[in-house]
Amino acid sequence: MPEDRDTAEPAPAAADAPPRQQVRLGSASAFALSAQVLALVTSFVSSVLIARTLGPAGKGQLSVVQQVLNILSVVLNMGITTANTYFVGKRGHGIGEVLGNSFLYSLILGAIGAPLMWLFTLGPFAVVEGIPLAATAIAIALLPLALVNQFVQGINVGVGEMKAISRTQMAGTAASIVVILVAWALGQLTVPMAMLATTVNVAVTFALNTARLFKRYTKRIRVHLDSMREAAPYSFKAYANHLATYLSYRADIIIVGYLAGAETVGIYSIAVMAAELMWYVPKALAQALLSKSMQTGEQSADMLALRSSRVTAGLMLVICVVAAVLINPLIRLFYGADFLPAALPFFVLLPGVWLNGISQVLFANLTSKGLLYPWIAVLTAAANVAINIALVPRLGAIGAGLASTLSYGTGALAIMAMFARHTGARPADWLLINRRDIAAVSASAAGYLKRGRTHGV
């Protein structure tokens, strides 16, 4: 048995151990993708309004505040989100005790993160100059809320509430765009106001996800030290993996800020945002696949992962080609000529984004088995930082894009190798879409639409 697998015997079910919601991969993915599409539209509208209002430098300041907040959210997450999903979904931990532990963790970790937020936005290690004090204050207040929101969402994934999670994300997204549009209409769209919109999004999402758990699964919360101790080994492995993975995605923004300034960050952030739009499909599918895989046998989970990966590979290839053709006119139309230099780093990012999207689906299968491989994420992050430091001073945003593609590709190939090792699959099995895949996707879509008409969804 591989040493990376969590091999502890299943714990006895807690008194409030959750009944699992049956997860339909097709409909759950469709709901998740719908939420992702709404987030995409909202993010795009917000990005256009913010970029045109604040210009490259202001957009760069906002990107830095958001990325410092996001990085701290991952640094302080401690793998608790993934552990909540695993121990609720696989090991029968009670909702009340997992919620209580999550609330306690978020308060402690949020307090630890507050001075770090100040240090990297206003203090002696500020990434860029000119970040408003109000934006940093909002980010500090948001940090514990962002953490507990992640923890609570992990619980919801564990009990199979995939459709409800998607609806909740839509509600939070809709609330945030209202704030952005009102601020823009009143001429008050500033960096702090954009951070306030993010806070509204997180607050609405957290409130709805938490209320659902209390309504359906538990009436009380409590801190349970034994479940903390049981989850700790898995949490630490998940933490190393998620921290390194996120740093490989986001360290480039911070490095570009230090080495090239706010205006280059503003340009590069547009390229990153455009490239990462291609991840909406694999992210939605991977989240649904993780929840579904925890409810099915290992062989069935492997077959689902292979089909999902083939569909992802084919669909993302088409999306990447279309995006490459349209990126220049779209940037000119929506962001203006000042942001046209973002097109070149966008082109450089595309190969890594394609490979990474496929690996996200395969990694969801490995995660459902307790196989996390944190060394892959550490290798990817180290490569990203090293290549960025080498290339950004010479090539600016293009160098950052090249560093990301090389590191994303390295990590994706390593995940594929581990998937092959544990399933015996070959690259063609997860890369080459076939007629049966197309037929299965068509049937799933038709069934989803039929159920939607029947139930008014």
Image: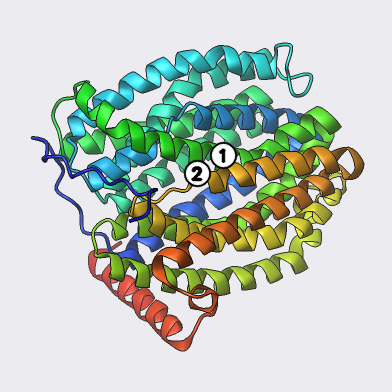
Above-or-below relation of 183 to 421: above
* Residue 61, image x, y percentages: 73, 28
Q: Nearer the viewer, residue 189 or 337?
A: 337
Q: Is residue 314 visible?
A: yes
* Residue 386, image x, y percentages: 75, 40
Q: Residue at x 21, y 59 (%)?
A: 22
Q: Amino acid at mark 1?
A: Ala
Placement of the C terminus among the 4 image quadrants = bottom left
Q: Which of the two discs, 1 and 2, sits closer to the camera?
A: 2
Q: Are marks 1 and 2 in contact (CB under 8 Å)?
A: yes
Q: Secondary structure at mark 2?
A: helix
Q: Nearer the viewer, residue 294 or 203?
A: 294
Above-or-below relation of 307 to 258: below
Numbered circle sitting on residue 244: 1
Above-or-below relation of 438 to 281: below
Q: Residue at x 68, y 53 (%)?
A: 274
Q: Amino acid at mark 2?
A: Pro
In whole angstroms, how far apart are the C-alphas of marks 1 and 2?
Answer: 8 Å
Q: Where on the picture, by quarter, is residue 87?
A: top left
Placement of the N terminus among the 4 image quadrants = bottom left
Q: Is residue 214 left or right of residue 255?
A: left
Q: How many marks?
A: 2
Identify the mark nearer the N-term, 1 or 2.
1
* Residue 330, image x, y percentages: 76, 58
Q: Where on the picture, by quarter, is residue 395?
A: top right
Q: Secondary structure at mark 1?
A: helix
Q: Residue at x 81, y 50 (%)?
A: 342
Q: Residues within 10 Å of mark 2 (few under 14, many from 20)?
A: some
Q: Is residue 59 visible?
A: no
Residue marked by disc 2: 374
Numbered circle sitting on residue 377: none
